[in-house]
Amino acid sequence: MADLMSAWPQVIPVLLARHMACVGCDMARFETLADAARIYGLDLQKLMADLNRVIENSNPNIPISEEK
């Protein structure tokens, strides 16, 4: 997760919208995206779709789902 946020900081609002505490978490260095999705009970495919959309789109105001 830390590598993801470091490489593409624009994904941080997606994570925060889903109430994921990965930003600033010491464990983020050791967890994969799949780990985090499982821990938070999120659908990995939906999460990846939102993250990819943010990464591919330079517009920071794209709508994101707020899956819980």
Image (cartoon, rainbow, N blue to C red):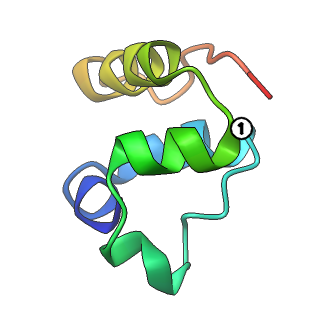
| Residue 34 vertical placement versus 2 (above, below) | above
Q: Secondary structure at mark 1?
A: loop
Circle 1 is placed at which residue position? 18
Q: Quadrant of residue 17?
A: top right
Where does the image place residue 3, in percent across and percent down from the top left?
A: 22, 63
At horizontal 19% and vertical 56% (from top left) the residue drawn is 7
| Residue 4 vertical placement versus 51 (above, below) | below
Query: What's the amino acid at mark 1?
Result: Arg
Where does the image place residue 24, in percent across and percent down from the top left?
A: 55, 79
At horizontal 23% and vertical 19% (from top left) the residue drawn is 56
- Along the horizontal axis of the image, is 12 left or right of 1? right
Where does the image place residue 49, in percent across and percent down from the top left?
A: 40, 13
Q: How many marks?
A: 1
At horizontal 38% and vertical 40% (from top left) the residue drawn is 34
Q: Quadrant of residue 45?
A: top left
| Residue 52 vertical placement versus 5 (above, below) | above
Q: Residues within 10 Å of mark 1 (few under 14, many from 20)?
A: some
| Residue 20 vertical placement versus 3 (above, below) | above
Q: Nearer the viewer, residue 11 or 30?
A: 30
At horizontal 74% and vertical 22% (from top left) the residue drawn is 67
The quarter of the picture where the N terminus appears is: bottom left
- Along the horizontal axis of the image, is 17 left or right of 49? right
The quarter of the picture where the C terminus appears is: top right
Q: Nearer the viewer, residue 40 or 4?
A: 40
- Along the horizontal axis of the image, is 20 left or right of 58? right
